[in-house]
Image: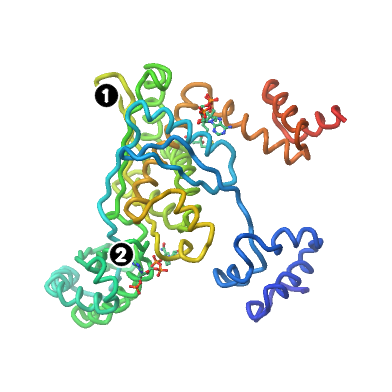
Amino acid sequence: MKTNSYSGFHKLSLEQRAAEVAEFANLTSEELALVTKPGALNNAVADKVIENVIGTYQLPMGIAMNFVINGKEMLIPMVVEEASIVAAASNAAKMARSGGGFTTSYTGNIMIAQIQAIHIPNPYFAQQTILHHKNEILGIANEKDPILVNITGGAKDIEVRIIDSLIGPMVVTHLMVDTGDAMGANAVNTMAEAVAPFIEKITGGTVKLRILSNLAAYRLARATAVFTKEAIGGEDVVDGVIAAYAFAEADPFRAATSNKGIMNGIDPLIVATGNDWRGIEAACHAYCSYKGKYTSMTRWEKNANGDLTGSIEIPALCGLVGGGTKILPAAKVGVKILGVQTAAELAQVIAAVGLAQNFAAMRALATDGIQKGHMKLHARNIATVAGATGEVLEKIVAQMVAEKNISVDYAKELIANIK
Ligand SMILES: CC(C)(COP(=O)([O-])OP(=O)([O-])OC[C@H]1O[C@@H](n2cnc3c(N)ncnc32)[C@H](O)[C@@H]1OP(=O)([O-])[O-])[C@@H](O)C(=O)NCCC(=O)NCCSC(=O)C[C@@](C)(O)CC(=O)[O-]
Ligand SMILES: NC(=O)C1=CN([C@@H]2O[C@H](COP(=O)(O)OP(=O)(O)OC[C@H]3O[C@@H](n4cnc5c(N)ncnc54)[C@H](OP(=O)(O)O)[C@@H]3O)[C@@H](O)[C@H]2O)C=CC1
């Protein structure tokens, strides 16, 4: 292959595509084998999951321990490439046990589909007109998915917003659909497309976009936890975490990093269960900013006893019956390890893990600094990249950590000295 402008690449077999890519990118046969050799996700299945497939790509699955959620002991599967995340989640969950673990709740599996209508000269009149026809709109939507209607009732309500925009006012109808154990993108998109002509007819406008909103403000998972001051290192640590939170609450530069720390917990669980991590990333970041400024996804306070209390409320977009969960064999194992039966349960675990992950990072930041714990574990990564294995690896990790000098170059130097 001499150029990447290649019409019909998708029509080749997986093996042909892999060979073409190897030629273009000068891959050795060993390098190519790292993506083409059969894995637990076999190539024939992988070829049906996305497009232009040349093979598969593995990531580690680790298990976060110690979680007690609503009184139930759970193992949390996490698929991720970053050292210290799984250890940190286990560490936080261990400390949360002193306060009884995590308590969660959920608003239900309600997704929003948006139908955007433009070119309407009288938007307030159109808004009320759409609301007059709520039952017909719900009827049209529900005709599209009788199975979902049987399971959950399907589309349940509408709301209509008028949005000022660069091209004038828009009348945006929200269709609220109970998507049950599905994340629900496909069901709500189909319904939105079905009701669009009727909205055009009753408003005289032109419908453009018909698509779900990732800002799933009616699909909220909540989690709380009490970390007793004794379990986390005393009242200074409580105050340190609250000061760290105050920084994130006030400053979007800090909030972005703190929230990345929360997604450190959420994304690996989302991936382990075959869910869409782009969807939940968009949802969580949008939800913590749509009431005004971009701020922290969590809240940290001190109770009357001087203990630390944490809370989180996020749109936990996830499902158990569709998307990757249905097709990826390892995702099914992830769900089984977790032991959840419904999307509602999964959503609540997601919130609890996000809260735990934030606590671990905030506690580290407020005490020793992040590098001590993180770099101790990252050092194993660095030593592996430098080529160390077995006893040599353990030895140089210990030395790099003790000397606080953790780099690939130094690891290589230590390996050479040992030899
Ligand atoms: C790293 C620790 C846990 C060490 O913490 P430690 O106090 O040295 O750990 P420990 O040896 O006392 O062990 C306590 C528990 O932690 C877990 N644990 C401890 N070590 C392991 C391990 N090797 N493998 C698995 N689990 C481990 C395990 O549950 C263990 O209990 P045990 O099983 O021994 O009874 C701690 O320092 C920590 O929680 N640090 C936070 C690390 C973190 O957040 N990493 C994420 C990457 S940094 C980032 O991306 C986000 C950030 C930080 O920027 C976000 C922000 O700014 O807010
Ligand atoms: N903006 C975004 O985030 C977008 C995300 N996506 C993608 O959409 C995918 C997820 O869509 P989703 O619609 O969940 O997946 P699927 O369409 O794969 O699966 C959902 C379907 O499963 C069936 N089903 C079976 N049992 C149940 C049950 N108990 N509860 C509810 N439904 C059930 C329903 O179909 P039936 O009624 O026919 O039986 C339902 O429509 C992900 O891959 C995501 O990446 C797509 C577009 C945009």
Q: Which residue is mark 2?
A: 179
Residue sitting at x 67%, y 35%: 380
Image quadrant containing the N terminus: bottom right
State which quarter of the image contains the C terminus.
top right
Give left or right: position of 173 versus 358. Answer: left
In the rendered structure, the answer to whether residue 329 lies left or right of residue 35 reads left
- Mark 1 beta carbon near ligand 1 (under 8 Å): no
Q: Amino acid at mark 2?
A: Thr
- Local SS, label 2: loop
| Quadrant hosting residue 246 | top left
x and y, in percent, of residue 133 in the image = 14, 75
Left or right: residue 9 compared with residue 240: right
- The reply to whether callout 1 and callout 2 are in contact (CB within 8 Å) is no
Q: How many marks?
A: 2
The residue at 56%/47% (across/down) is 61
Observer-side mark, 1 or 2, equals 2
**Residue 357 image position (x, y, % from top left):** 45, 37
> Residue 171: percent from the left, percent from the top?
24, 69
For label 1, the residue is 303
Mark positioned earlier in the residue sequence (1 or 2)? 2
Q: Residue furthest right?
A: 419
* Residue 206 visible here: no
Q: Amino acid at mark 1?
A: Asn
Find residue 218 and report its image quarter: bottom left
State yes or no: Cβ of the residue under disc 2 lies below 8 Å from any atom of ligand 2: yes
| Badge 2: residue crowd in 10 Å (few <14, some 14–19, many ≥20) | many
Task: Sort mark 1 into few (<14), some (14-19) or many (20+) by Cα contacts within 10 Å.
Answer: few
Kind of element beneath mark 1:
loop
Question: Furthest-left residue in view?
Answer: 132
